Amino acid sequence: MLNTWEKHKRERREGKGYDCACYFREMAAENVVDISDLSVKRQRDEEDGAQNGVSDTLSTLSNDSLYPGFSAVIPGWFSEISPMWPGEAHSLKVDKILFQGKSDYQNVLVFQSATYGKVLVLDGVIQLTERDECAYQEMITHLPLCSIPNPKKVLVIGGGDGGVLREVARHASVEKIDICEIDKMVIDVSKQFFPSVAVGFDDPRVTLNVGDGVAYLKNVPEGTYDAVIVDSSDPIGPAQELFEKPFFSSVAKALRPGGVVCTQAESIWLHMHIIEDIVANCRQVFKGSVNYAWTTVPTYPSGMIGFMLCSTEGPPVDFKHPVNPINDNDSLQSARPLKFYNSEIHTAAFCLPSFAKKKIDSKAN
């Protein structure tokens, strides 16, 4: 019997258009708590929101909106429900709704939680919290950049919250940082509500491109970048193409010989079938190293998230042993020290549980 996620994938292939919205309507119909029971208040008045470039007009979420995550919760709690992890949900107590809107691509929500600070949610899925964002942002950035000597040109695909930019900027050797984010609302909301994360946009080396990352990469001259970091959401909706073989081929073309890519690669506890597909695609495309690493992020499904790290043919890259350590004594570190990453945890990130190692290694041939 197919689980909900397998049904979603099959019906997409068959052109039936099953999507997350359908899933959440089904889930909402089965739950005992009506979404209209959840009272939501604004933090600011409309004038303040307009001055900051982001409207936070919100009264009460209605049954018509069926906002993902609020369709199946008790009043005052956000519960992350998705076909990507059927049968389970992680919940956070909501102190206050700060923003809720719909961009051209997805639903965007920001709320103040009781225990993890402010939380950014896209289409019902937590993207970051103030408390644990360091574990993701630092690892997805420094695992690749600390594995090659003197990276100079870096491309970030996605990453509209600015956190990866903040971390790339720690590397003094980097001269140029390009970012391509498809959703301007994510950028604007992050700058308003997560300034300590979005500070990455302020670095003078950063060039922002608002648009489709897949299309952007197709126009990048061959061998442009030393590193590409793909900070994508799950493979549903606008991020789906970022997990497919043609996209990886475009990334490989954009990298110099011995260049590296790091991409978000799901959870070994929930998405082993997806990871196996990603590994297989990457081994076909990247002729250097191909490795899977992981980190703990308490507010992500199953409490962890993985990364695929690959290099193109050229100077060998040993991802497991960093060769470009971050200087703990530099001025940026003194002002904004690392909270999670260090050289020991870098190496440890590639140690996999036996069941995951067996499946990933089986894709080596």
Image (tube, helix red, strand yellow):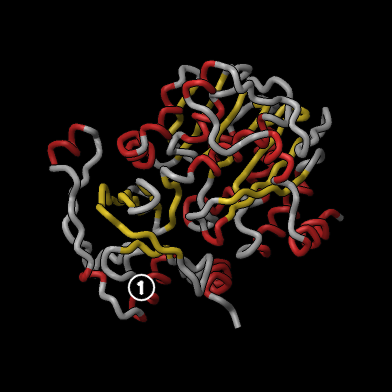
Q: Give how far across and how far down residue 176 sits, in percent.
A: 56, 20
Name the image quarter holding the N terminus: bottom right
Give the x, y percent position of residue 236.
Answer: 50, 58
Task: Give the class, few, some or many, for how many residues have Cα within 10 Å of label 1's Cα (few <14, many ≥20).
Answer: some
Front residue of 167/208: it is 167
Q: Mark 1 = which residue?
A: 25
Locate the C terminus and report the quarter of the image it occupies.
Answer: bottom right
The residue at 77%/42% (across/down) is: 286
> What's the amino acid at mark 1?
Arg
Residue 170 screen position, x and y as percent: 56, 24
Q: Which is nearer the eye, 335 or 80?
A: 335
Residue 17 appears in the rendering: no
Residue 41 image-quadrant placement: bottom left
In the rendered view, tell whether residue 210 sits above or below residue 353: above
- Front position in the image: 281 or 290: 290
Q: How many marks?
A: 1
Identify which residue is drawn at 21% across, 46% down: 56
Quarter residue 39 falls in: bottom left
Q: Is residue 64 left or right of residue 176?
A: left
Asked whether residue 150 appears in the rendered view, the answer is yes
The residue at 83%/28% (across/down) is 315
Q: Residue at x 40, y 57 (%)?
A: 123
On the image, the x and y values in percent for residue 303 come to: 55, 57
In this picture, is 248 found above or below 329?
A: below
Considering the numbered disc 1 on the image, is that residue within a helix, a strand or a loop? Answer: helix
